[in-house]
Image: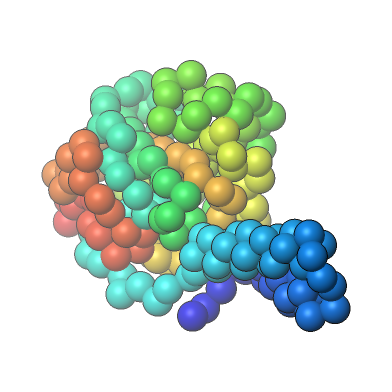
Amino acid sequence: MKIAKGGLSWIIPFFLITISFIFLTFYTNGMLKYVAYSLSILSLFISLVLLLFFRDPHRKIGNGIVAVADGVIREIVKVDDEDVGASTKISTFMNIHNVHVNRMPTDGEIKDIIHHKGAHTPAFKKESEKNERVTILIKTGIGIIKIVQIAGILARRIVPYVKKGDTVKKGGKIGIIRLGSRVDVYLSTKKIKSINVKAKDRIKAGEDTIAEIYD
């Protein structure tokens, strides 16, 4: 299983702690042995959860505009965005069991990456729009596409894999949000021929087509 960039620094310490507690059970007795045994199970469980969270599976890249994040479509709404203009916002909620590596929706150049400090309310609530977030503006063949990675109640860090000026292919990895979160994608309405998803659909980043563009 491939592990996402930055994941091993979280996983390895818990596996080492697990091994340490297992060894401790062989050299202790009574209550201390029971405590060491219990903590070894707990740390092993955390290790496996982190292994699941930081997995980075291979994806066959789909057609059209592809999903940026794994998860469930939270909402699809028309908005007048300050960066994109008249646009369709597709919001995806990422649970802790989803793959958390985010991907490019189409070929493009990273025009800007902006970090905004904020709160850490649950990512599925409307108030989460004021949460800690990273805005990525991408120059593409259909104009500017905006991606907003939003931290949640558990997600405390958004880690970009790209920087301003980078040219990234469709499906290329652009970053990871740790431990549950939300990703909003803003697409220019006049450039989109159709939206291929609806609320409550489950999607996979890089693989599922969320929109078709005019030729």
Q: Residue at x 26, y 27 (%)?
A: 77
Residue 177: x and y, percent? 56, 50
- Nearest to the observer: residue 48 or residue 203: 48
Q: Residue at x 41, y 30 (%)?
A: 124
**In the visual, does 76 lie left or right of 179?**
left
* 45 versus 150 height, above or below: below
Residue 160 sits in quarter: bottom right
- Nearest to the observer: residue 12 or residue 77: 12
- Nearest to the observer: residue 190 or residue 149: 149
Is residue 103 in view from this perspective?
A: no
Q: Residue at x 33, y 54 (%)?
A: 67
Residue 49 sits in quarter: bottom right
* 85 versus 50 height, above or below: above
* 9 versus 125 height, above or below: below
**In the visual, does 19 lie left or right of 103?**
right
Residue 19: x and y, percent? 74, 76
Residue 153: x and y, percent? 57, 33
Q: In the current view of this chain or complex, which residue is farthest to the front? A: 30
- Nearest to the observer: residue 204 or residue 152: 152
Q: Residue at x 54, y 35 (%)?
A: 152
**In the visual, does 199 lie left or right of 205?**
left
How is the structure coloured here? rainbow
Residue 211: x and y, percent? 22, 49
Q: How many marks?
A: 0
Q: Quadrant of the C terminus?
A: bottom left
Q: In the current view of this chain or complex, which residue is farthest to the right? A: 27
Is residue 97 in view from this perspective?
A: yes
